[in-house]
Image (cartoon, rainbow, N blue to C red):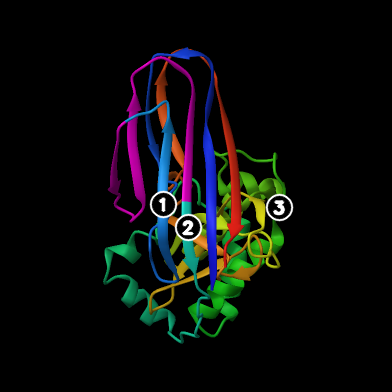
Amino acid sequence: MNRLRIRHITGFHYGGEVTASYNEARMLPVSSEGQLVLFSNLEILPMSAHHTYVDYWGSRVSSFEILTPHKELALTATSLVEVRPRDHPEHIISWDELAAAAERSTEYVEQRKQTKRTQPPAEVAAIAREIADAADNPCDAALAISRRIGESVEYMQGVTGVHTTAAEAWEHRKGVCQDIAHLALGALRSVGIPARYVSGYLHPKPSAGIGETVRGESHAWVEWYCGDGWRGFDPTNQIDIGDRHVTVGHGRDYNDVPPLRGVYAGSFTSTLFVTVEITRES
């Protein structure tokens, strides 16, 4: 078990003084299978009252508005989370059984439909179909598809942006975890496997000592329904979800779980800044 302290600083520098801004933040994890939140807090500057709720997808949301003139918006989310290793038992289920099981719950039905961000190019859909046809069952197919997508896209920052679609990322064969997750989702859904986007954090250094603080970043991976709950995999790093992954939210794609989203009054430009620090405490 790992006890991880996460400090996530983000916000906007504005090109001038804006008169008001209206925002939503999804930066605090929730206790769930495999993780227990011991402490979490969100600081907002300029100071603002905020309303906290759990959205449709189960993510903690802080909604707030700042009605005084400001040139910068800064948020600091601090969380202390105990993360346990996850078990990934084999689930043997047929394609027909999976289709029937997925139809019984809205939770799974909604994760079978493509979005504009996940719609896969024909080549990706063909790869997924080839793997699915050769697999003994959909659970094995899902893992093989996710691995293939991760192997096919080189992790590289600066090539894609926050609005890049799966098809656009595939053209480059380069992107970040968000792009790779969208491609994996598109591939899985194209063969009828319900799959969802997961946002959170990954401790980047398995050998980190207790008390050691390392530079991290927001991360994304996928989960698919395999007949008995959700099974997670990190296609960017080609690893199972374990005690270095901290989940913040789930959704159909990135658009359902952005860490910070908002609008502001003014014609100035805005520049996003982000810093993530992760400390292993035990």
* Magenta residue span: 49-78
Q: Tag on residue 155?
A: 3
Q: Is residue 275 left or right of residue 189?
A: right
Q: Amino acid at mark 3?
A: Tyr
| Local crowd size for mark 2, using a 10 Å CA cut-off: few (<14), some (14–19), many (≥20) | many
Tell which of 276 and 219 is nearer to you. Answer: 276
Q: How many marks?
A: 3
Q: Residue at x 39, y 77 (%)?
A: 98
Q: Is residue 204 left or right of residue 50?
A: right
Residue 164 to residue 212: above or below: above
Q: Which residue is mark 1?
A: 40
Q: Is residue 3 left or right of residue 56?
A: right
Q: Quadrant of residue 161?
A: top right
Disc with the residue nearer the chain's start (2 vs 3)? 2
| Local crowd size for mark 3, using a 10 Å CA cut-off: few (<14), some (14–19), many (≥20) | some
Q: Nearer the viewer, mark 2 or mark 3?
A: 2
Circle 3: element type: strand
Q: Amino acid at mark 1?
A: Ser
Tell which of 89 and 180 is nearer to you. Answer: 89
Asked whether disc 2 touches disc 3, contact meaning CB atoms under 8 Å apart, the reply is no
Q: Residue at x 70, y 60 (%)?
A: 152
Q: Amino acid at mark 2?
A: Leu
Q: Which residue is mark 2?
A: 80
Q: CA distance from mark 1 to mark 3?
A: 30 Å
Q: CA distance from mark 1 to mark 2?
A: 6 Å
Residue 236 to residue 71: above or below: below
